[in-house]
Image (tube, rainbow, N blue to C red):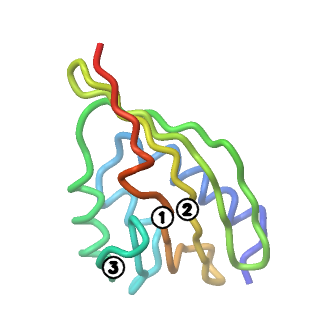
Amino acid sequence: MASSESIMKVIYKYLATAPMGTGAEIAALYAPGARVEDPVGTAAHVGTDAITAFYDSVRGGERTIELLTLRVAADTAAFHFRVTTVIENTTIVVEPIDVMTFDDQSQITTMRAIWSPADVVTSTA
């Protein structure tokens, strides 16, 4: 089983890469055959190609991420964070809670993002 420290390192790398990284850079943190459900209740993205395409599809604007809370237990991590995206004069903020599981090599095997459109706050300058 991956250690709590190695899982935390992957999460910090994920949060550092996700704002402006490519889909391939983010997908590299996942195990082959991993599953992403973002948000929970939508169709899952399974495997490296699908995960890469998913993250490439949500790129755009200037994005920052702030970690609010992180918990790790065994092979599972849950973390609450704030994503702020600025596109032209519009600011979009959402605070999802992600739940990830990890394999023995500290690669992400599943990611479930808990948020809904009702959680998205949009403002214009």
Q: Earlier in the sequence, mark 2 or mark 3?
A: 3
Asked where in the image residue 52 lies, by quadrant, the reply is bottom left
In the rendered image, the vertical position of residue 112 relative to residue 16, given as above or below? below
Q: In the rendered view of the protein, which quadrant contains the N terminus?
A: bottom right
Instruction: Quote the CA–CA distance across marks 1 and 3.
Output: 11 Å
Q: What residue did someone put label 1 on?
A: 113
Q: Position of residue 16 (x, y in %)?
A: 51, 43
Residue at 46% from the left image edge and 58% from the top image edge: 115
Q: Amino acid at mark 2?
A: Asp
Q: Amino acid at mark 3?
A: Ala
Residue at 50% from the left image edge and 63% from the top image edge: 114
Pointer 2: residues within 10 angstroms few (<14), some, or many (20+)? many
Residue at 71% from the left image edge and 64% from the top image edge: 6
Q: Position of residue 73 (x, y in %)?
A: 79, 72
Instruction: Quote the CA–CA distance across marks 2 and 3.
Output: 14 Å
Q: Position of residue 58 (x, y in %)?
A: 26, 51
- The numbered mark at residue 44 is 3
Q: Are marks 2 and 1 in contact (CB under 8 Å)?
A: yes
Instruction: Quote the CA–CA distance across marks 2 and 1.
Output: 4 Å
Q: In the rendered view of the protein, which quadrant contains the C terminus?
A: top left
Q: Are marks 2 and 3 in contact (CB under 8 Å)?
A: no
* SS type, badge 3: loop
In the rendered image, the vertical position of residue 10 relative to residue 65, given as above or below? below
Q: Earlier in the sequence, mark 2 or mark 1?
A: 2
Q: Is residue 24 left or right of residue 70?
A: left
Q: What residue did someone put label 2 on?
A: 98
Q: Are marks 1 and 3 in contact (CB under 8 Å)?
A: no
Q: Is residue 1 left or right of residue 111?
A: right
